[in-house]
Image: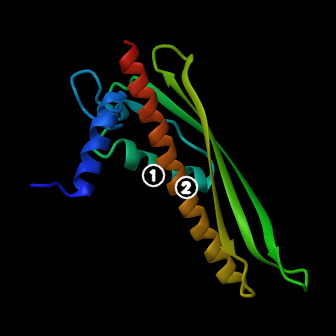
Amino acid sequence: MSMDPRTCLSMAVVVLLSACGFTPLYKQNQTINVPEDFRQIEIARIPDKIGLDLENKLIEKLQSQGQKKPFRYRLQVALSEEKSSLAVKKSAFATRANLTIRAHYQLQSIDDPESVFNAQSRSSVSYDLLTDQYATLAAEKNARTRAVLELSEKIKIQLAAFFQRLKRTQ
């Protein structure tokens, strides 16, 4: 009886990945429990409307099972935003714009204000510049929402990788 080539390939990939030390990012075992580590992070207030949106997304992604007090870590985030026009028509009017949001963040131990993890992420999204000003504002708002969602996911992934490295070295 012969095996399907796709099945053989799948089995080979699994064997190769397990041999190189690959482990799933959110795998829970006795020493590594990333969702539990997320619950121990206090998310500091992030200024402005976009900061509040990011703060709410981070709470939703990191603490979906609730917070665990007392906190062990504090996450501080600073945001910057940049807009640039592109796709210019012959009439010299821009028809497309890019919105780039950068997040510089640090994870601090509650017991020691020294930073235990520093990183930065950025999200760049584009939107149409329309003749109707309201439609352009709505498109920009939608782009900002997409950028915040992408940033929150990137921050979550980087924090998960940090916690896995931390647990492996302990």
Q: Is residue 22 left or right of residue 137?
A: left
Whether residue 37 is visible here, answered yes or no, is yes
Which residue is more in the foreground, 10 or 55?
A: 10
Q: Position of residue 28 (x, y in %)?
A: 24, 32
Q: Point out the image quarter for the N terminus.
A: bottom left
Q: In the rendered view, tell whether residue 18 sits above or below residue 100.
A: above
Q: Which mark is residue 148?
A: 2
Q: Position of residue 83 (x, y in %)?
A: 75, 61
Mark closer to the chain start, 1 or 2: 1
Given the current orientation, which residue lies at the most extreme left position?
1
Q: Is residue 89 left or right of residue 16?
A: right
* Residue name at image x 54 percent, y 41 percent: 45
**To which quarter of the image does residue 24 belong?**
top left
* Residue name at image x 38 percent, y 50 percent: 60
Q: Residues within 10 Å of mark 2 (few under 14, many from 20)?
A: many
Name the amino acid type tagged 2.
Val
Q: Point out the image quarter for the C terminus.
A: top left
**SS category of the residue bearing label 2:** helix
Q: Residues within 10 Å of mark 1 (few under 14, many from 20)?
A: some
Q: Position of residue 119 (x, y in %)?
A: 59, 33
Q: Position of residue 2 (x, y in %)?
A: 14, 55
Name the amino acid type tagged 1.
Lys
Given the current orientation, which residue lies at the most extreme right position?
91
Whether residue 55 is visible here, answered yes or no, is no
Q: CA distance from mark 1 to mark 2?
A: 8 Å
Q: In the rendered view, tell whether residue 51 sits above or below residue 170.
A: below
Q: Which mark is residue 139?
A: none
* Residue tagged 1: 57
* Residue name at image x 59 percent, y 56 percent: 49
Q: In the rendered view, tell whether residue 86 sits above or below residue 104.
A: below
Q: Are marks 1 and 2 in contact (CB under 8 Å)?
A: yes
